[in-house]
Amino acid sequence: MPGWLIGIGFAVVLAGVLFLLYTYVLPKKSATADSTQPAANTATAATATPGSTGKKAHPLAKYLEITGVRFNEDAKQKASVQFVVVNHSAADLPELKMNISVQASGKPLFEFPFTITSLGPFESKEFSTPVQTTLKGFEIPDWQFVKADFDITSQP
């Protein structure tokens, strides 16, 4: 049997196996689209309004993110929190007053008012502020276990 005939036969068999796998093993597109649609809607509904209050969200809240939360202590053991505020919009954002709540495992650690300076399009800035707490430095959870929520108190 010539080598070229073996090569063509092998290619046909391989193409047939791949076609069968594609047809019967992979999920149908309509089935995956229908099953993931409700999950996507609930995920966007949960993240649509920052903070845990039922108040109407500020129109600029959807463009802001607070991330990179870190805790520090100075030499006098005064706690401070560092965080990054990210502007995800293509517009300049004005100075905004907000209440920031830092939580770990659903329990609030710190709540404090803060005013961020204006942010340019797609800009991020790092901020730091002292916080009042009765927790010791070793009692504060590590950065990967905390989440920061905010409510903008400035008028729209």
Image: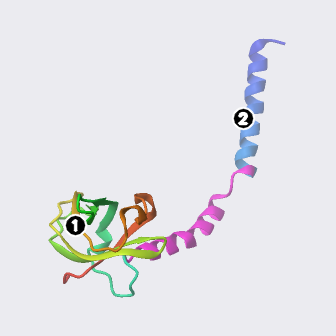
- Sort mark 2 into few (<14), some (14-19) or many (20+) by Cα contacts within 10 Å: few
Dot 2 falls on a residue whose secondary structure is: helix
Front residue of 102/154: it is: 102
Q: Which mark is residue 15?
A: 2
133 part of magenta stretch: no
Is residue 87 in view from this perspective?
A: no
27 part of magenta stretch: yes
Residue ID at (32%, 71%): 62
Residue ID at (79%, 19%): 6
Is residue 140 in view from this perspective?
A: yes
Relative to 73, say whether 110 is above or below.
below
Residue type (three-letter) at the residue carrying disc 1: Thr
Mark 1, residue position: 129
Disc 2 versus disc 1: distance between alpha carbons? Answer: 63 Å
Residue type (three-letter) at the residue carrying disc 2: Ala
Front residue of 18/146: it is: 146
Give the quadrant of residue 154: bottom left
